[in-house]
Amino acid sequence: TAAPDLAGRRVVVSAGGTREAIDPVRFLGNHSSGKQGYALARTAAARGADVTLVAANVSLPDPAGARVVRVGSAAELAEAMEAERRGADAVVMSAAVADFRPVRSVASKIKKSGAAPGPIELVENPDVLAGLVASRASEAPGQTIVGFAAETDDVVANGRAKLERKGCDLLVVNQVGGGRAFGTEDNQAVVLGADGSVTDIPTGPKDDLADRVWDLVVERLP
Ligand code: PMT
């Protein structure tokens, strides 16, 4: 059994991948299965935390001990995270959030007309993680905020730049591509700290990686 080092703490974890509607039957999405986020929720609960899991389009069974809030789009995920982060000691954004959404989502299914289809125009979504950091001082002073990053190249350099851009306390950088991380049972990461720390987490089950991330969060809790 795990040490109850998160007892009396409230944590919020996002998991899965958002879907941005094109029409009632089609969407822009990504390959996140939610396994890494569910592992974070499960391990935090096992360590005694009060856990809220914001799940975007995940088809896994609810993790024991977590309250699950279901969302679809990036806008819904943003709204749920902003509400749930109040009073939480730590927030972990492991969801893969769409950077862009279609400018228009039409109410009726787009039909084949014989003519060439028009382009799908995109607009940028707000950055949920950066928003949580920006509103921390007024909404949740002292909260520890953790981001994840999926990078294909120059993992540490790109991760460091992303950490600085987003302003979170820890960034868990996964190497993706070549069948890694998305949908798999195992994961590996380099965790970069705003304090300059670098922690290597070798390949292993997603629950093990989750436990290592909570170890780093526990060190930072007041
Ligand atoms: O779900 P699995 O199949 O187990 O796969 C796990 C995973 C690979 C999805 C996960 O480990 C992971 O890396 N998640 C983050 C993927 C991602 O979206 O990375 P990013 O580099 O695009 O975003 C960086 C951070 O900003 C993330 O914390 C993301 O949640 C956040 N973000 C991104 C865009 C946006 N509009 N708002 C955000 O909050």
Image (cartoon, grey):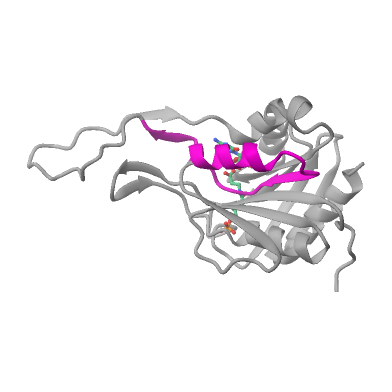
Q: Is residue 82 magenta?
A: yes
Residue at 70 percent across and 59 percent down: it is 41
Quadrant for the N terminus, please.
bottom right
Q: Quadrant of ligand 1?
A: top right
Q: Say which quarter of the image contains residue 141.
A: top right
The answer to which of 179 and 106 lies nearer the viewer is 106
Residue at 83 percent across and 44 percent down: it is 198
Q: Is residue 55 above or below residue 170?
A: below
Q: Is residue 98 above or below residue 67?
A: above
Q: Position of residue 137 (x, y in %)?
A: 78, 26
Q: Is residue 122 above or below residue 173?
A: above
From the viewer's perspective, is 23 left or right of 67?
A: left
The answer to which of 36 and 78 lies nearer the viewer is 78
Q: Say which quarter of the image contains residue 61.
A: bottom right
Residue at 49 percent across and 35 percent down: it is 99
Quadrant for the C terminus, please.
top right
Residue at 89 percent across and 43 percent down: it is 220
The answer to which of 140 and 155 lies nearer the viewer is 140
Q: Can see residue 149? A: yes
Q: Is residue 79 magenta?
A: yes
From the viewer's perspective, is 18 left or right of 203?
A: left
Q: Position of residue 135 (x, y in %)?
A: 70, 27
Q: What range is drawn magenta here? A: 74-102
